[in-house]
Amino acid sequence: MIDKFTLRARQEGYRARSAYKLISLNKKYNLIKRNDKVLDLGTWPGSWMQVCQNLSAQVTGVDTKQIQYIKNVRFILGDIFKKETRDKIYSLEKFDVVLSDLAPRISGNIEQDQYKSLELSKIAFNIARKVLNRNGNFVCKTFQSQEFNEFLKDIKNYFNFVKATKPEASKKSSKEMYIVAKGYRT
């Protein structure tokens, strides 16, 4: 069964329903502004990059899976677990926003999937801390787990505003949460 967000994405030319998660978060928290430099981690299939373009932001995407061409974006094919990929990211300019929609390959083992999601989120957070401009913003998807509150607490040490939220476009059955962090303190 196709849900309303999948149908809407097809009608409006977005590559995935996840576009509406970012649209909703941006509308509520004003994360991405015109001409912002945005780093999108876990970019495949590219719907968040499309949203950033529609907001007139300059976007760089990173993923282990090649995306189909999107005009006027920069893309790095690589794995953020690998130093070589992180070094490519660090060699770029600073960013105003870092987005992470990274998710592990789902194994069906809830605890294992939660652990892998948290590991991806921690890497995204560490990357954000190295590449964000002062007062920059960070959005990170992670699965709820026992360690979730500790991770949230750690992020609060570096940002003026931190909130955990679940956008309407997230499936009700999903354990995913989005951490919105604004006002990076370098």
Image: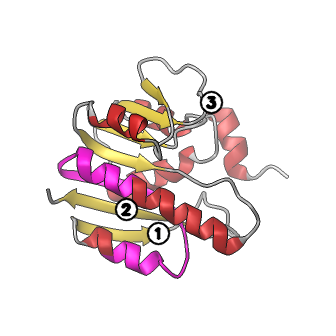
Comparing 149 with 163, the one in front is 149
Tell which residue pokes out farthest to the front in this image: 83
User: Which residue is at a point 67% across and 42% down the rendered structure image?
Assistant: 8
Disc 3 packing (10 Å; few <14; some 14–19; many ≥20): few
Of all residues, the one furthest to the right in this rendering is: 1
Q: Residue at x 67, y 62 (%)?
A: 171
Q: Residues within 10 Å of mark 1 (few under 14, many from 20)?
A: few
Spatial distance from mark 3 to mark 1, Cα to Cα? 26 Å
User: What residue is shown with label 2?
Assistant: 180
Q: Which residue is mark 1?
A: 165
Give the mark nearer the N terminus: 3 vs 1. Answer: 3
Q: Residues within 10 Å of mark 2 (few under 14, many from 20)?
A: many
Q: Earlier in the sequence, mark 2 or mark 3?
A: 3
Local SS, label 3:
loop
- The magenta segment is 124-153
Q: Is residue 126 magenta?
A: yes
Q: Position of residue 37 (x, y in %)?
A: 28, 35
- Residue at 55% x, 62% y is 117
For mark 3, what is the residue?
A: 13
Task: Identify the element where label 2 is drawn.
Answer: strand
Q: Identify which amino acid the numbered label 2 is placed on.
A: Val
Kind of residue at disc 3: Gly
2 or 3: mark nearer the eye: 2
Q: Is residue 109 magenta?
A: no
Q: What scheme was used to colour the molecule?
A: secondary structure
Give residue 75's position: percent from left, percent from top: 45, 26
